[in-house]
Image (cartoon, helix red, strand yellow):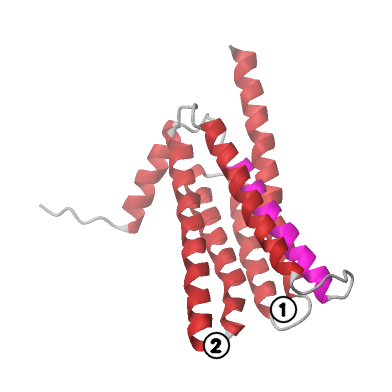
Amino acid sequence: MNTATTPQDDLSFLRSLAEAGRDAPLQAGPYLVAGGGWFATASLLFGLQALGVLALPATSMWAVWLVAMVGFSATLFMLMRRHSQRVANTTNAVIGAAWSAAGWGIFAFFVAVYIVAARTDSYAVLNTIAPAVLVLYGVCWKLSAEITRQRWMKGVTALTFVALLLVAASIGSRWTWIAYGAALVLSAVLPGLYLMRLARATQASVAARA
């Protein structure tokens, strides 16, 4: 018996899972706002330093990244603890797994690139981190759009890939971190806020029907 499946079969399976819980509000919004918000703020501070708007010691900028990582980790812990008591529906389970996998991929790539930079004494490779993050964001938005069939997510997917190209074009200039910070706002913070708004509207609608 032939058990081979095609990518279309896999996508249809994921979509059927999502449709089983399509009336439940998506819970990814706060996570996107947290991740995008902390690191976009750090990136914009770096960008203002590069443009000469902020006169901060170069060593203090590492503290900015440390604060962003600690802040995001603490926020992530609180969000996961808050949502741990909720029963996960299929839509949130599939989309949450995709974004979680992207997060682990970003972390692994970050560590790997730093190892390469240290071993080759060529820190220019660190410039690949920002594009890699946006590639994974775009992939996750594409997957989310296909599963949920929400058209606005396709727009976010396209916007994320456009932002990716703009960030890539800015590398080597003083505008790199400003571009990356803006890209995180467009691809994570603003869509995350919109997801939170949709979730509140869905919850209010369910409560009104109860």
Q: Nearer the viewer, mark 2 or mark 1?
A: 2
Q: Residue at x 47, y 72 (%)?
A: 112
SS type, badge 1: helix
Q: Residue at x 65, y 35 (%)?
A: 198
> Where is 32 relative to 196, above or below?
below
Residue 103 visible, this angle:
yes
Rendering coords of residue 11 (x, y %): 38, 50
> Where is 35 relative to 166, above or below?
above
**Between 124 and 56, the one nearer to me in the picture:** 56
Q: Amino acid at mark 2?
A: Asp
Q: Is residue 127 left or right of residue 11?
A: right
- The mark total stands at 2
Q: Main secondary structure of the magenta part?
A: helix
Q: Residue at x 79, y 64 (%)?
A: 45
The residue that label 1 is drawn on is 170
The residue that label 2 is drawn on is 121
Residue 155 visible, this angle:
no
SS type, badge 2: loop
**Between 174 and 60, the one nearer to me in the picture:** 60
Q: Which residues are magenta?
A: 28-50
Mark earlier in primary sequence (2, 1) = 2
Rendering coords of residue 68 (x, y %): 67, 56
Q: Residue furthest top?
A: 210
Rendering coords of residue 20 (x, y %): 42, 32
Q: Is residue 187 left or right of residue 11?
A: right
Magenta residue check for 94? no
Residue 14, located in which quarter of the rendered image? top left
**Which quadrant of the figure contains the C terminus?**
top right
Residue 131, located in which quarter of the rendered image? bottom right
